[in-house]
Amino acid sequence: MKVNKAVFPAAGLGTRLLPITKSIPKEMLVLVDKPLIQYGVEECMCADITDIIIITGRGKTAIEDYFDRSIEHEILLKEKGKHHLLKSVDEISSRISLTYTRQKEALGLGHAILCAQNMVGEEPFAVVLSDDIIDSDTPVMKQMVDIYKNFRYSVLAVQRVKDEDVSKYGIISGKEIEKGLYAVEDLVEKPELKDAPSNLAIIGRYILMPDIFNFLKDTKPGKGGEIQLTDAIKSLLQIQPVYALEFEGNRYDGGNKLDLLKAQIIYGLKNDEIRSGLTEFIKKSEWCRN
Ligand code: G1P
């Protein structure tokens, strides 16, 4: 069956980006001219995904407002002949279905995914963590769906990370069956370096078989006292294969200030409106010469 649906967990408190995340959901932080979540949604659209399910929590209404129509803006912009300013978000609302459900308690990523069970049903589905910003020629979700079409089992996005970063991620080990594609053999959520089975880290893109829900229900709180998706995938592995794709692309951690700034520059240089001004600014700048 085709991957039609994507779940976007967006109930987290964004503590790494405080104080701004007191009032602005981290998914709504702007990258050049669009909120982070919109990049993830557009990536899914490129992979022919038609249904987006956003798991929200308290203080996240800005996400719903953003994707909703704003009649006041539409009227005002029409009068001024500037309706193109709403084009990219209008196109999303007209081409895909967006639904929302609430995660009432912050019990972890695994629990957030479980909240989407009824909306997903018995279909394979994607998961996108929108603070993982991935710049690639072929959108990462498209790369993953292409693998899914061949193997018809879960696919995780992975990337090699430095030893000192291993403890920040879910880590997999596996057998390389094609260049950059692994049949997963083990998974550990945020291990200490000495316990890590490799340095292949899970990055926030997944395609999961619906069987994962049965395991999520039984997953006990793990690392950090949270219900971990990684632990449920480890259980899923006992009944069916799971694959991991070392994707093509550069990833920036939107929850990290330096990475977010790097992403602003990279995406700014790709933006027709500001490319030349930004290039000129960087070239002329004296601030990093000494
Ligand atoms: C989550 C997952 C982790 C994964 C990471 C990718 O962790 O639990 O396995 O490696 O996303 O960004 P978080 O960063 O939400 O703590």
Image: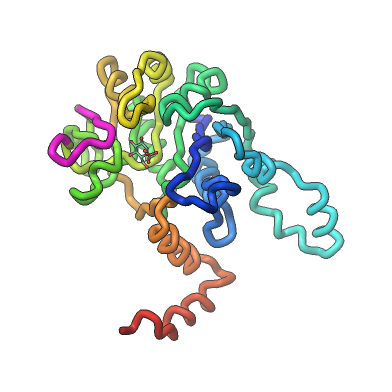
Name the residue located 47 percent from the left edge and 77 percent from the top edge: 279
Question: Looking at the picture, how far across and down is residue 142, in whole percent?
Answer: 43, 42
Work out which quarter of the rendered image holds the C terminus and state it: bottom left
- Quadrant hosting ligand 1: top left
Q: In this orientation, which residue lies closer to the viewer: 155 or 102?
A: 102
Judge left or right: residue 272 versus residue 178. right
Q: Is residue 187 magenta?
A: yes
In the image, residue 42 above or below residue 137: above
Judge left or right: residue 127 versus residue 41. left
Question: Looking at the picture, how far across and down is residue 130, in whole percent?
Answer: 48, 44
Q: Is residue 163 magenta?
A: no
Name the residue located 60 percent from the left edge and 27 percent from the top edge: 101
Write down the region rendered in magenta.
186-195
Judge left or right: residue 234 versus residue 121. left
Question: Looking at the picture, how far across and down is residue 237, in whole percent?
Answer: 27, 21
Question: Looking at the picture, how far across and down is residue 93, in whole percent?
Answer: 67, 41
Q: In this orientation, which residue lies closer to the viewer: 127 or 243?
A: 127
